[in-house]
Image (tube, rainbow, N blue to C red):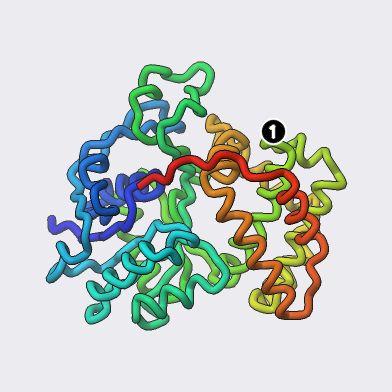
Amino acid sequence: MKRTPVLIVGAGAVGTVLGHHLRLSGADVTHLVRPGRAEPHAAPKLLYDYDDDEIKLYQGYHVVEHASELAGRDFPFVVVTLDGHTSRTEQGVATLTSLGDLVRENDTVVIMCGIGVGLRQHYLDVLGIDEERLLFGVQGALAHQADPTFTAPPGKDAEAFARADYCYAHPKRGTGFSVTRHNPTEAERFASLYNTSAASRCSYLNPHMADAFSGALFAIYAAWGLKGWPALDEVIADKPLWTLACDAQREILSLPANGRFGKLAAGVMGPKVTAAYHRAQERGVRPLDLAKFNAFHHGAKVRAQDVAMLRDLAEEGARADQPMPALRDLLGRLDAQGEPHELAAQG
């Protein structure tokens, strides 16, 4: 059987777990990594599956350091796992430019996983591709690299956990990845490929929902971080802070860029509904500790990017003559909290 070629830009936790599931589905996976990083990311990799409490072997993939090494190859799909901040750095722009040179003259569909104000337009401009060839993707399975922060869940195989290079947990519905239907035909084609193995599931996202909530969630992470990343119920129990975070969330959802859908969502996502949503997520990824995962990721590794995203949203509000008082209050508290030590970039 001929394998469908898929290029993944990045080979950190997200890129590796995505590659593993695509490989299980019969894809011929290649990872494009930073110069000098091919050897550390070479196959095989050991992945601990929180759901099955066992090691999964990811092998049979390729790693390259320069897009020019792929000249002449046809990739139906390219998934870019760079975050929004990295996508705008000098190195990120250079990577996207070389990627555009690789795919611009063919029918490749690019799936971007980064989040940021105006990021979609940035991708379209740098890649030089048509609107219908750019989708947005979200990793549903939470994934992290091996780190002393994490220990094996109680009663689970500590030896297997200790051997892993990366660990991941699916939400209880089994959705490992989601893709927007900016181009329904191509979104369905990617989902069909991903779903071949049945080990994980690719679902669809409404583009308006993805745009609105991708920014709004950061208000909740901000409040969680201000409390020091305890169990979620402790954050919800702090009613003044939780209300402030939900008010900031409403302000973000109500931005003109989010249109009518954002206004409707702002009317629905009050403190009770927001609490129910996040409690369901917390339950859904057990035995992975969601508070510990968010502390590792949003509290340290990408905290600076998260805060920058909230600042960008506040400025977007200012341009639209929306004062965003709750969001600006949160930003003031984050400034007073100071910057924690950031983890070294991975992938």
Q: Is residue 263 left or right of residue 205?
A: right
Identify the residue shown where x is 21% and y is 50%.
63
Q: Which quarter of the rendered picture does the N terminus lie within? A: bottom left
Residue 50: give x, y in percent of width and height: 45, 31
Judge by depth and name the residue closer to the eye, 9 or 258: 9
Judge whether 313 appears above or below 49 on screen: below
Question: Can residue 180 be seen here?
Answer: yes
Identify the residue shown where x is 80% and y is 52%.
271
Judge by depth and name the residue closer to the eye, 141 or 146: 146
Judge whether 245 appears above or below 319 on screen: above
Judge by depth and name the residue closer to the eye, 301 or 248: 301
In which image quadrant can residue 137 be found? bottom left
Residue 51: give x, y in percent of width and height: 45, 32
- Which residue is tagged 1? 230
Residue 145: give x, y in percent of width and height: 41, 37
Identify the residue shown where x is 29% and y is 66%.
77
Judge whether 267 appears above or below 306 on screen: below
Identify the residue shown where x is 27% and y is 36%.
45
Q: Is residue 221 left or right of residue 100?
A: right
| Amino acid marked by disc 1 | Pro
Residue 8: give x, y in percent of width and height: 30, 57
In which image quadrant can residue 44 be found? top left
